[in-house]
Image (cartoon, grey):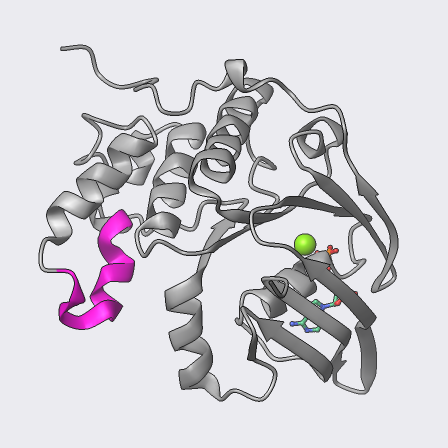
Amino acid sequence: MSPLIDVRGLTKTYLLGDVVVNALQGVTLAIERGTFVAIMGESGSGKSTLLNLLGCLDRPTSGQYLLDGIAVETMDRDQLAEIRNEKIGFIFQNFNLLPRMNALENVELPLLYKASETPDGDDLGAHALADVGLVGRERNFPAQLSGGQQQRVAIARALINKPAILLADEPTGALDSHNSADIMSIFQALNRTQGITIVMVTHSDEIATYAHRVIGFRDGLIVSDKQMTKRPALAETVALQPVGAVSP
Ligand code: ADP
Ligand code: MG
């Protein structure tokens, strides 16, 4: 089978006034279905730029991107939005929840763009929250949740459309080590039990140990690409327990 993500000679140039920034300088990368990849590298090395291109949030300056066999680099905005909705879930460092919507409303937000395909949105949202251990928190607003809980809401939102790929840009960057480990347990469970392909940017060597493969970035180029052998045991997984839920 062809790789889920197949990128060839990808470049991205930003123009800021008359300053030219070559954020990606020719990235070639194949990611097989079901893998868990970590991307590491110094700030400014192009990691987020790559993730945005992989996530169809933006288009490359040049190069090719086959996503699940579909050429994405020539698509227009609407087509990109459609494929993004269908195949990709995003997680960000700062959770990006809407502050005036409660947990359930945040999680169900992507369903609004899916027209009538999902007749029973309420159940879907509640199930998605239960899957990340947030039973009893459905009506909480983001400000009433801890950072770790907010990131769980963001994960539930990212998964509501059943994407093949989860893209995470420093998902534990704003969390303490305990919450970071919880979030990684959720990622690991999603990867192992649902086969979701994960591409995660991280600054932490410890967080990167959860991945199968670690790709190093420098100056818009891949400078290393390693398969990992030692990984934390699945026994550490606490993800699908209702951690932090209110007591009955
Ligand atoms: P990383 O995520 O590895 O820190 P980025 O992909 O965010 O790096 O940025 C790579 C380079 O591209 C940096 O020099 C950054 O300043 C520049 N850059 C990123 N986004 C933009 C943008 N929208 N406009 C102009 N320059 C940008
Ligand atoms: Mg970044």
Please tell me whether the stretch drawn in magenta is mainly helix, strand or loop.
Answer: helix
Residue at (53% x, 15% y) in the render: 236
Residue at (13% x, 69% y) in the render: 116
> In which image quadrant can residue 209 be found?
top right
Relative vertical location of residue 17 with respect to residue 49 in this rendering, above or below: below
Which image quarter holds the C terminus? top left
Q: Which region is colored magenta?
A: 107-118
Q: Is residue 77 magenta?
A: no
Give the quarter the ligand 2 occupies.
bottom right
- Residue 16 appearing in the image: yes
> In which image quadrant can residue 36 be found?
top right
Q: Is residue 114 magenta?
A: yes
Residue 52 location (% of width, % of height): 59, 65
Please state which of residues 114 and 47 is positioned toward the viewer in this rendering: 114
**Left or right of 75 in this view: 150:** left
**Left or right of 160 in this view: 193:** right
Please state which of residues 157 and 73 is positioned toward the viewer in this rendering: 73
Relative vertical location of residue 219 with respect to residue 137 in this rendering, above or below: below
Relative vertical location of residue 78 with respect to residue 173 in this rendering, above or below: below
